Image (tube, rainbow, N blue to C red):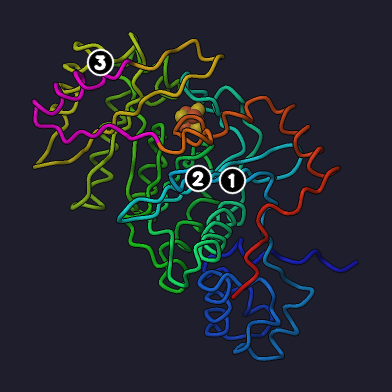
């Protein structure tokens, strides 16, 4: 029985070179192939005109470039695009593209579900199914980039930034994450600067240290509370890695990226973590770990309520008052704009529709019974 074809989206450039070597091919052939796949969105080896015919022949049957099936695609009036991808066995993950004047940001998922179980997060309420593979993480970027180029009728890059803030805790899927990050940074891949690729973590301290050494991209930390008692309730991982350990890990991380800063994410929950005393405690916490100059930024996120959470969004004046206290204390603070509200793509609504896995299964089954044209054909090359 012949082996199943290998999905070439699973490889960073070193991995692809090793694969090509097993086929008796030199590294520069792997580089050519890598560029065809990631820079030009090609999936059909016969299109790869500058690859030796003999290599194309070897790839046929042994390898393929496999996209994730698209279950739904929604385009908001503000240009935000949300995709729901089928990752099999009734699981689905989401990716969201957010266009702005000076950048195009893609938010992607690292796991189907999440084991951390943050109280304010609809993915956390859904539970954990499985880690995505490197290829499944990259397939979201590969598809979105090449779909958007076609959709917008442009040949240059559309996605300038990637944030690992979709479903899942990326640092609990470390071995699949790092090769995917390397492809994003690789000049032969997506060529992004490491400051334009952000990993968001709820605070998996040992893996923050490893990421700092292996691939020090921008880091966002889901803080959400200024003390351990409250953070234990909102982000259960805090019981394992409490605030003091987390803040020290942030400082160590910056030692690998000294001109960078950590972004602290803070989801504003009415009456829970949004009072003036919380702001003052937050300022004191951050001051305690300040070294030189600006070492962090705060991003206040309006909560997107969902019924099972039992939580409410902080009123806008409360968010403004909280932000003012932080700003007056000299902390760089922003309030996240909500985007794509009309398609449920705002932060925290990611996967909001898939928290009930039965519904996903039904939706996928329905899609298969009634093949509503592929909403967006895989890029398939230029
Ligand atoms: S906020 Fe992030 S880490 Fe927490 S449950 Fe949601 S996906 Fe997991």
Segment tinted magenta in the rendering: 315-338
Identify which residue, 274 or 228, lies in the foreground: 274
> Does residue 14 sit above or below 269 in this rendering?
below
- Work out how far the residue at label 2 is from the one at label 1, CA to CA, in angstroms: 6 Å
Crowding at dot 3, Cα within 10 Å, few <14 / some 14-19 / many 20+, comes out as some
Q: Rounded to the nearest whole Å, what is the CA distance between mark 1 and mark 3?
A: 33 Å
Residue 117: image location, x then y, percent? 52, 23
Residue drawn at (13%, 34%) of the image: 290
- Where residue 182 sits in the image (x, y, percent)? 45, 61
Q: Residue furthest right?
A: 1
When asked about the image quadrant of residue 46, the answer is: bottom right
The crowding category of the residue bearing disc 2, from other C-alpha atoms within 10 Å (few below 14, some 14 to 19, many at least 20), is many
Image-quadrant location for residue 194: bottom left
Q: Position of residue 344 (x, y in %)?
A: 52, 33
Instruction: Tell me, yes or no, whether the two marked residues, 2 and 1, touch with CB atoms within 8 Å.
Output: yes
Q: Is residue 85 found left or right of 343 in the rendered image?
A: right
Q: Looking at the picture, does residue 268 appear above or below residue 371?
A: above
Query: Residues at badges 3 and 2 in contact (C-beta under 8 Å)?
Result: no
Nearer to us in this view, 140 or 287:
140
Residue at 74%, 44% (x, y): give it.
88
Outermost residue on the front side: it is: 77
Tell me the quarter of the image containing the N terminus. Answer: bottom right
Residue beneath the point at 43% across and 71% down:
156
Tell me if label 1 and label 3 are in contact, CB under 8 Å. no
Sequence-earlier tag: 1 or 3: 1
Which of 283 and 96 lies nearest the eye of the viewer?
Answer: 96
- CA gap, disc 3 to disc 2? 28 Å
**Picture mark count:** 3
Q: Which mark is residue 318?
A: 3
Which residue has dot 1 on it?
A: 83
**Which structural element holds mark 1?**
strand
């Amino acid at each position: 029985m012949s082996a199943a074809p290998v999905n070439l989206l699973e490889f960073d450039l070193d991995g692809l070179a090793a694969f090509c070597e097993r086929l008796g091919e030199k590294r520069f052939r792997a580089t050519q192939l890598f560029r065809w796949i990631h820079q030009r969105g090609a999936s059909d080896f016969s299109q790869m005109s500058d690859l030796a015919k003999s290599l194309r022949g070897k790839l046929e049957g042994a390898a393929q470039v496999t996209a994730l099936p698209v279950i739904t695609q929604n385009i908001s009036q503000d240009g935000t695009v949300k995709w729901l991808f089928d990752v099999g066995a009734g699981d689905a993950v989401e990716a969201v593209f957010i266009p702005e004047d000076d950048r195009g940001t893609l938010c992607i998922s690292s796991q189907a579900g999440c084991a951390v179980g943050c109280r304010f997060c609809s993915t956390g309420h859904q539970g954990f199914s499985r880690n995505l593979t490197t290829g499944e993480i990259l397939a979201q970027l590969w598809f979105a980039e090449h779909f958007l180029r076609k959709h917008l009728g442009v040949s240059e890059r559309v996605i300038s930034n990637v944030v690992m803030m979709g479903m899942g805790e990326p640092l609990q899927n470390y071995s699949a994450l790092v090769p995917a990050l390397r492809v994003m940074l690789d000049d032969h891949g997506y060529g992004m600067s490491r400051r334009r690729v952000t990993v968001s973590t709820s605070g998996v301290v040992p893996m923050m240290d490893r990421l700092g050494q292996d691939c020090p991209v921008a880091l966002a930390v889901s803080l959400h509370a200024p003390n351990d008692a409250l953070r234990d309730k909102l982000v259960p991982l805090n019981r394992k890695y409490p605030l003091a350990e987390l803040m020290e890990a942030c400082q160590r991380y910056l030692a690998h990226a000294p001109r960078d800063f950590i972004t602290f994410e803070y989801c504003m929950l009415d009456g829970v973590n949004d009072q003036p005393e919380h702001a003052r405690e937050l300022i004191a916490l951050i001051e305690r770990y300040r070294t030189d100059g600006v070492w962090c930024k705060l991003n206040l996120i309006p909560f997107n309520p969902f019924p099972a959470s039992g939580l409410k969004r902080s009123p806008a004046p409360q968010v403004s008052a909280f932000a003012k206290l932080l700003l007056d204390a000299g902390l760089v603070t922003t309030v996240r704009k909500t985007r794509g509200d009309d398609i449920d793509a705002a932060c925290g609504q990611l996967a909001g529709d898939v928290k009930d896995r039965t519904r996903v299964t039904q939706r996928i089954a329905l899609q298969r019974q009634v093949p509503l044209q592929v909403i967006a054909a895989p890029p398939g090359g230029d």
